[in-house]
Amino acid sequence: MMPQSAPSISSDALLEVDNLVVEYPVGSRIVHAVSGVSLQIARGETLGLVGESGCGKSTLGRAVLQLRRPTAGRVLFDGHDLTAMQGDVLRLMRRRVQLIFQDPIASLNPRRKIGDIVAEPLVIAGVKDPERRRQLVYEVLSAVGLDPTLVVGRLPHEFSGGQCQRICIARALILNPEFIVCDEPVSALDVSIRAQILNLLEEMKARFGLTLLFIAHDLAVVKAVSDRVAVMYLGRLCEVGPSEQLFARPAHPYTALLIEAIPMPDPDVRPAETVPVGEPPSPIAPPSGCRFRTRCPRADQRCSDEMPELRAVAPGQFVACHHPLI
Amino acid sequence: MNGNNLLSVEDVVVDLPTPRGNLRAVDHVGLTVGAGRTLGIVGESGCGKTMLSRAVLQLLPKKAKLSGRVMFDGQDLLQLPPEKLRKLRGRSLAVVFQDPMTSLNPVLTIGTQLIETLQEHLELDDAAATRRSVELLAAVGIPAPEQRLAQYPHQLSGGMRQRVAIAIALSCEPKLLIADEPTTALDVTIQAQILDLLAREQRRRHMAMIIITHDLGVVAGRTDEVAVMYAGRVVERAPTPALFKKMRMPYTEALLAALPKLDAAPHTPLPAISGRPPDPTRPLKGCSFSPRCRYAVARCQNEKPALEATETKAHQFACFHPIEAHADANA
């Protein structure tokens, strides 16, 4: 697989993903979930990762944290290669990285009290003093906007989706991590609750000096929180760039299609009648050359013969396309 | 509002018994849809929008208690015998659900399901029903429709299944199509395709449509009228352009403001609505939105505002302190 690389805007990369490949068997066939993705995330930066279902964005997020071991490629976290680590060394490194899931209710053990759920990472990390643990749990629950005295003794089912996501965020923060992968953290939440959680993530990021990989299918949500955005299609990156620039002047036809397809809450914006064609092909048998070519209005022979590499089209903006829009 | 309404929902109440007490899912709702018109019903989870549509379709859970009147095409649906109701559903009153697998039978081929529906309601012979099925699948944008007839739902993608569900819903030329979150489970590019498909078929067939959604973006460009629901009640109702031009109910305004905007700079804090909707088994005395409303005063907590029209008959809202000058002052 050819490398696909996007230099970051800053040289101070906390996370560096280098030509990552994740493949797994389904029956006798191979799913090409992630096919040679490279990206960097600078310390203190939020990188948004967007794409439709099955594009490999969640697999990429898990492979970064070594929750799914990549088939090939490297993941450098603060200079350390996570893909080469195992056992205790990896477990120790994992304290510095955390994951927040899409379904907050399903990711909390229904039989355990909130206080125990949030304290568990401390127990695993070997914080033996119960009083110290209690103090840390109270601090982090207050930080995410919950009243610890009312919360610690209760069970997850007593809380709404938004509150459960606050609890998940508290659990992710308690070991004071540096890097969090947020995998669709608000897509299961109602609009009015979604805004609360997005604001909370932004606050926590500032307060704890976090670096985020923010995975979502909703472009507006991603733009709201991200410094840079990476667009993924069928296992590969199409485009990477600073958020505002990418939304104002998308270079990849797929990015443009995604932006155009968003239903705008404004009756004066008539929905585009240029119906995007077709559906993504299966990652079991991705098309040759550019993977988007089967749906792309600009595709020609070259797109099926030759896989486009990421290249700069504007400062900080990289596109993998033979016929970019800019 | 006049005699030309295809559907008229009058003072509908849906109560569901729960272990925690009575849950009033729909609380005195009245709505109308004219022939060929599109109504959007917008609200968050638990606001009663789906229960309201189930009340119209008479597909409520067995334990639910329903009162009020649902007039459709000159008939009171609540008084119809089950056999007549069954004939009506699928024929002139059709529905598309969020998850197409709720309406598609997993062990029957697409062809069997389409042909069965057509023969049940339209008395077509096998050849005519097959021909019509192929036409319908082609109309909803399914490639190679002849071959699809022999396939099972699990062999299709989510978007394709939803197209099949729409083809079945459209098969008997319904007068009203209720689409309950038809695109929520789909990806954004597929969502745009399905919404375009629904709009095109609606215009072509002069069919009335109710789109139920949590997404103000879905109703903005695609409906004639919007009803916003909160805690079981309609809290604002207006022609779509009027609603977006001048929202009167603070909840509607807050709902729109809380959406991340594509034209906003990254890291702009969102004007979130604090708190969450009230427990539907513990109804509030006053306005249900008052605990979260930044304009609320004592009266809002003690008295329930009725859904009333003011200057224009078409724009109604249930609020003692509607948004008046805010929008103008900012302009």
Image (cartoon, rainbow, N blue to C red):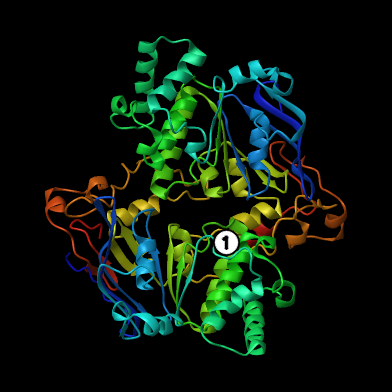
Taking the image as shown, residue A282 lies to the left or right of residue B275, namely: left
- Residue designated by label 1: A194
Looking at this view, is A123 or A63 the one in front? Answer: A123
Counting every numbered tag in the picture gives 1
Q: Secondary structure at mark 1?
A: helix
Give the image quarter of residue B72.
top right
Name the residue rendered at 54%, 56% in the picture. A188
Number of other residues with Cα within 10 Å of mark 1, as a class: few under 14, some 14 to 19, many 20 or more: many
Name the residue rendered at 56%, 83% in the picture. A122
Looking at this view, is B221 or B276 the one in front? Answer: B276
Tell me the chain of label 1: A
Looking at this view, is A71 or B170 the one in front? Answer: A71
Name the residue rendered at 35%, 66% in the picture. A60
Q: Where in the figure is residue B321, as x and y percent of width and height?
A: 78, 54
Task: Determine whether A162 is above or below B166 in the image.
Answer: below
Task: Determine whether B132 is above or below A266 in the image.
Answer: above
